[in-house]
Image: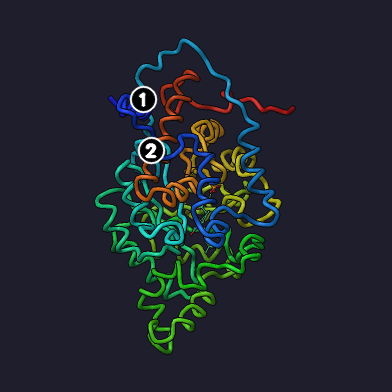
Amino acid sequence: MAKHWADFQYEIYLNGLTGAVPRLPTDLTRLEALTERRLGPGPVGYVAGSAGDGSTARANRAALERRRIVPRMLRDVHERDLSVEVLGRCLPAPLALAPVGVLSIMHPDAEPAAARAAAAQGVPYILSSASSTPMEQVAEAMGDAERWFQLYWPKDREVARSFLNRARAAGYTALFVTLDTPLLSWRPRDLDQAYLPFLHGVGTANYFSDPAFRAGLAKPVHEDPDAAVTHFVGMFADPGKTWPDLAFLRENWDGPIVLKGVLHPDDARQAADAGMDGVVVSNHGGRQVAGAVAAADALPGVVEAAGDRLTVLFDSGVRTGDDVFKALALGARAVLLGRPYAYGLALDGQAGVEHVIRCLLAEFDLTLALSGHASPSALSPADLVEDTA
Ligand SMILES: Cc1cc2nc3c(=O)[nH]c(=O)nc-3n(C[C@H](O)[C@H](O)[C@H](O)COP(=O)(O)O)c2cc1C
Ligand SMILES: CC(C)CC(=O)C(=O)O
């Protein structure tokens, strides 16, 4: 019998018999406000902020909220199985933790704590290139859990090649290449605080520990950290890249490659033509293009264009179990969770991230069952209506 994530609900009530209540709210939309009170203005602005006036981040939520579930009754939901196949792996639920860099500004235990939480719950963790901890150390923290690596594609080919070699050697099996960040967007919350973690050396661990990166420095990092940061800023991304450049990644990575940040159906077709394995429909949580299409509104078009040539994943705005339901009903195979787990980490370290995962999946499991479905594969757009009021 598959695990019933909804059992967490009963566990909470049972614990209540001894007077215990959850340390964090079970409504994950409340975590941001709590984090705002806990962290300094720079870090909290960085994680909670988005591009421009925040309209894309708001649109992400609105596009999910506008879609309403139409529950069905009397359909035997006693036994449920939330498992899905993603990139050739069987996942226990349609969820992975999105790559979120610089987690040490949230909590000193940073990426290893998030990775341990994901591993404990059996959920894949996608480690960011811009992590505060080198990829090898995070891999160790994950034990034998599924490891996926996110690449910010460096301008320097040798550094890119070195990252891919290191990731493979450390046991990462799938590569997520983020396309929507060739430049950092206009982010007023960060600009008003004049705060960018990288300039404080945070998020540079994979670079500063990389032999190919270090070969480009006149002096060792510890002798001239400012020069190392400048070198990092110069090579972090390359706005000159185009579709044919993907051949380099295909030649240097033999596992699945997923392009993150795809919103247009034609880009999905190009991804498939370039031999990619999947796409993440994402607008980076509203952090890149202010005024961009909401991710949930872009999802159906990408799903149609992808057909059976690509695995389609989704992120941007997922906060609740019903958001997961809606993304899957619109055609995503699984969702990536972003800010909520970073807030869980900020508020309660590894335990906070585990709490977030368990709440989200318990709520999803219950939403699925109460809507008359026993597995994610049963969902379709017909389970939703659009609230046009
Ligand atoms: C603080 C922060 C750091 C992020 N760092 C990365 C990153 O290093 N690589 C990446 O591909 N996406 C990064 N993202 C984007 C997430 O992977 C994901 O697309 C986004 O958080 C989803 O939106 P949501 O937070 O509204 O759910 C970051 C997001 C946040 C909030
Ligand atoms: C721009 C990156 C370095 C980190 C990131 O993805 C983000 O802050 O959204």
Locate residue 226, reporting x and y percent: 48, 82
Q: Could you tell me which secondary element the residue under label 1 belongs to? A: helix
Residue at (45%, 21%) from the top-left corner? 373
Disc 1 vs disc 2: which is toward the camera?
A: 1
The residue located at (46%, 73%) in the rendering is 201
- Toward which corner of the image does residue 121 lie, by quadrant? top left
Closer to us: 172 or 232: 232
Front position in the image: 224 or 298: 224
Instruction: Categorize mark 1 by other alpha carbons within 10 Å: few (<14), some (14-19), many (20+).
Output: some
Task: Please state if 280 lies on the left or on the right of 114 as rendered.
Answer: right
Give the image location of residue 366, x and y in percent.
44, 24
- In the rendered image, the residue lying farthest to the right is 389
State the SS at label 2: strand
> Dots 1 and 2: beta carbons under 8 Å?
no
Q: Residue at x 45, y 30 (%)?
A: 363
Which comes before the other along the chain, label 1 or label 2? 1
Out of 25 and 56, give the one closest to the viewer.
25
* The N terminus - image quarter: top left
Q: Amino acid at mark 1?
A: Tyr
User: Residue 340: horizontal and vertical position, in percent?
Assistant: 49, 45
Instruction: Tell me residue 245's x, y (percent).
Output: 53, 66
The residue most toward the front is 19
Please name the amino acid that badge 2 sits on: Glu
Q: Residue at x 52, y 59 (%)?
A: 40
Q: Is residue 57 left or right of residue 375?
A: right
- Give the residue number, with chain letter if any, for mark 1: 13
Q: Quadrant of the C terminus?
A: top right
Asked if residue 225 is positioned above or below residue 146 in the image, the reply reads below
Point out which mark residue 85 bears. Answer: 2
